[in-house]
Amino acid sequence: MARDSSKTRRRLIAAADGLFYGQGIRAVGVDAVAEAAGVTKRTLYYHFASKDDLIAAYLEERDLPTLGRYQGMIPEGGAPAARRIRRIFEQLGKNAENPRWRGCSFLRAAAEFANLPGHPARVVAARHKRRFEAWLEEVLAADGFGEGAALARQLMILLDGAVAQILIHRDPSYALSAADAALTLLKRANKSKKRRS
Amino acid sequence: MARDSSKTRRRLIAAADGLFYGQGIRAVGVDAVAEAAGVTKRTLYYHFASKDDLIAAYLEERDLPTLGRYQGMIPEGGAPAARRIRRIFEQLGKNAENPRWRGCSFLRAAAEFANLPGHPARVVAARHKRRFEAWLEEVLAADGFGEGAALARQLMILLDGAVAQILIHRDPSYALSAADAALTLLKRANKSKKRRS
DNA sequence: GTCTATATGCCGATAGAC
DNA sequence: GTCTATCGGCATATAGAC
């Protein structure tokens, strides 16, 4: 069996996911990850070259599923972009009500390794956010928005800004404030869309 | 001399500031802080009950000066709120160009201690953000904006969202995208202000 | 108030057997 | 591929002299 998909490796990543997301990456030692996975530390180091390697795998594992979860929660492509975007923010608010919610794993990793721009975790995190922004642009484009790139950026800012405020204040209602702002921005962009057509 | 203002204590906080902000709180040991301050670890523990106590003092020390720096950089009270708000975002972009910039110390602390809602660092961070939001509301009110509380919240979301994106992508231009969004929101709020008067 | 010296335990990572 | 055993180092925190 290829090392990339071995059962033990997957269990280690799952254990790392629970611990790193739950308590923070630097706060969790490799001993704890190995124990949670039911193997020894030596086995962990057979599957991963270093803790940094494990961290990268942890975030990599979250990349597409995280995006997919948002993609799955919004109405189908036929719906107006405004309704689809609003759903994203509403769902963020709902997610944040879960007591195990701890914000965005990618943002938190970037914060923990703020002094290491080349760290594998930073690379994966940046790529994830680029992917997310590109998807938002697609959602806008599907409803005929022009200049979708600039607007998608602003939606990303609102989304991660809401995550930050919710985490700071432990108050999911910031997601609704962000949703209002997003709809206002969409409304203005809509005007120029109509004008152009 | 009172313990709260002793010279050694202040030097320890200054050393902690440089190291915690530069490298992250959990990434820095108390040994490093003591050495940077030119004292031994034992002296550090004379002035602070624990590392958590030192962390709280580090953030406390940043609270008012951080707010004051933003207050000092915007045009005087007579200027329109739109111009004053825009300046805040522009200045954020300029600050982020400094290679030593590492995002917001309060956000990063909240991210590092995401699993400890009652941690002293979280308490200080939340209070700082509340203070900042209240100040934004004052800026809006000074220019006759009604419903300033909701708008101030959205500006906070944009501001911290921009910080997050800049940190992730190491691209200060997100500050300008956020500025555009902020001005759009202000313009719509402005309308209702005019209508009401 | 500051020092030297130390307690105790966890950190990431490795040696070598099976 | 997984194990037992262990390395050297650093973590937070403390004892007791001066």
Image (spheres, coloured by chain):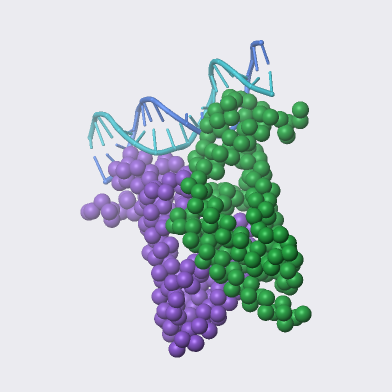
Chain colours: A purple, B green, C cyan, D blue
Check the picture and name the quadrant holding the C terminus of chain B.
bottom right
Say which quarter of the image contains residue B79: bottom right
Residue at point 44%, 83% (across, down): A143
Residue B162 drawn at (x, y percent): 53, 61
Q: Position of residue B166 (x, y in %)?
A: 49, 57
Identify the image quadrant of the N terminus of chain B.
top right
Q: Residue at 63%, 32% (x, y): give it.
A: B11
Residue B98 visible in image: yes
Q: Is residue B180 above or below residue B74?
A: below
| Residue ID at (53%, 34%) | B29
Closer to the camera in the image, A72 or D6:
A72
Q: Tell me: A53 left or right of B177.
A: left
Foreground pick, C14 / A132: A132
Identify the image quadrant of residue B35: top right
Is residue A64 shown left or right of residue B188? left
* Relative depth, front residue between B130 and B53: B130
Q: Where is residue A124 shown, x and y percent of the image?
A: 38, 56
Count the marks: how many? 0
Give the x, y percent position of residue B125.
64, 51
**Relative to B83, does residue A36 appear above or below in the rendering?**
above
Left or right of residue C6, residue B130 in this image: right
